[in-house]
Amino acid sequence: MEKRIGPIQKMHTQAADVVQYALPVGDARVALNPLLGKPVRFRYTGRIFCVHCGKQTKTSFSQGYCFRCMQTLAQTDMCILKPELCHHHLGTCREPEWGTAHCMIDHTVYLANSSGLKVGITRSHQMRTRWMDQGAIQALPIVKVKNRLDSGRVEIELSKVMADKTNWRLMLQGKTEILDLKAKRDELFSTWLAELPGERLDEEEYRFAYPVNTYPTKLTSLNLDKQPEVAGELQGIKGQYLILSTGVINMRKYGGYELEWESESSEPAGSPAGVESAASDQTGSSPPEAPGSKVASATPGDPGSQTSLF
């Protein structure tokens, strides 16, 4: 049996024929794909450590930060959730150097299909990570802009005609139908408002398949604050959710929570995403590939395998 204890972070992903997952537990990273169909057990010890400064905190804020970090870091400011409120250009960013490195760079506006059509934004080098974190089965970059503020302005306009959030319940039911994202993009371009910033993109669609043996027929959401011990057969992984025989749990929500993890031994996590899994360990198959589309795959040093802030 493999036993680990430590604070967890969001699951790391790596694009491949089937998305590869690893869960950071303390200093270790547990490869999850090889555990499909096997029992896992983990228990919340009652301790939480800030994912930024590492200090113990009674309450987690903004998915893993202590109160002080939540109040002082640029990455926990309101403009991260609402990019149209970015205020770096006003000279009021909490951490100007961080803002320059993360917000004053190319961002991409995209269409994605996780639970239906939605619009979203991300740093251009983080696109695939963002899509995998959302459980998207399709994604299409449509506009590139020079900074986070402009991406927020475009997104807020498009959110008037389509969703800008993923319905996690629909995403986990595995019934999402393939959409014609290019047709929707072309429709948006034909009615594009001239004042919106950005370079229109003519890129190929990305598709993703997830390691899921069985989708739940009834969704039971597990909560570590109410039920500190979770056990069950791992039936799938999609987005940042573990699908267990006993319910589903959003692991990203519990960043910084100290867990005692127990499962059958898996391969050591050694790839850029902290995952090492043979092809025989992958479960599921690639979704049907549309003409001109491409299935996301891993490349050495691929930024799509790293942690995404937004």
Image (cartoon, rainbow, N blue to C red):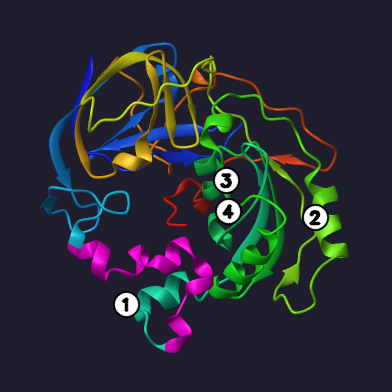
Between discs 2 and 3, the one toward the N terminus: 3
Numbered label attached to residue 46: none
The amino acid type, in three-letter code, at marker 4 is Met
The amino acid type, in three-letter code, at marker 2 is Arg
Question: Is residue 122 inside the magenta stretch?
Answer: no
State the residue position of label 3: 131
State the residue position of label 2: 185
Q: Give above or below for 170 relative to 38.
A: below
Numbered label attached to residue 127: 4
State yes or no: discs 4 and 1 in contact (Cβ < 8 Å): no
Q: Gap in Å between the C-alphas at discs 3 and 1?
A: 28 Å
Q: In the image as oriented, which residue stretches furthest toward the front?
A: 160
Query: At 29% across and 44% down in the image, what residue appears?
Result: 255
State yes or no: discs 4 and 3 in contact (Cβ < 8 Å): yes
Q: Gap in Å between the C-alphas at discs 4 and 3?
A: 6 Å
Q: Give above or below for 150 relative to 8.
A: below
* Mark 3 neighbour density, 10 Å: few (under 14) some (14–19) many (20 or more): many
Q: Which residues, given as a range, are shown in magenta? A: 68-90
The amino acid type, in three-letter code, at marker 3 is Trp
Q: Gap in Å between the C-alphas at discs 4 and 1?
A: 25 Å
Q: Mark 2 or mark 3: which is in front? A: 2
Quarter location, residue 220 = top left
Label 1 sits on a secondary structure element that is loop
Query: At 31% across and 43% down in the image, what residue appears?
Result: 9
Q: Give above or below for 107 relative to 51.
A: below
State yes or no: discs 3 and 1 in contact (Cβ < 8 Å): no
State the residue position of label 1: 94
Q: Nearer the viewer, residue 70 or 273?
A: 70
Q: Nearer the viewer, residue 139 or 168?
A: 168
Between discs 2 and 1, the one toward the N terminus: 1
Q: Quadrant of the N terminus?
A: top left
Between discs 3 and 1, the one toward the N terminus: 1
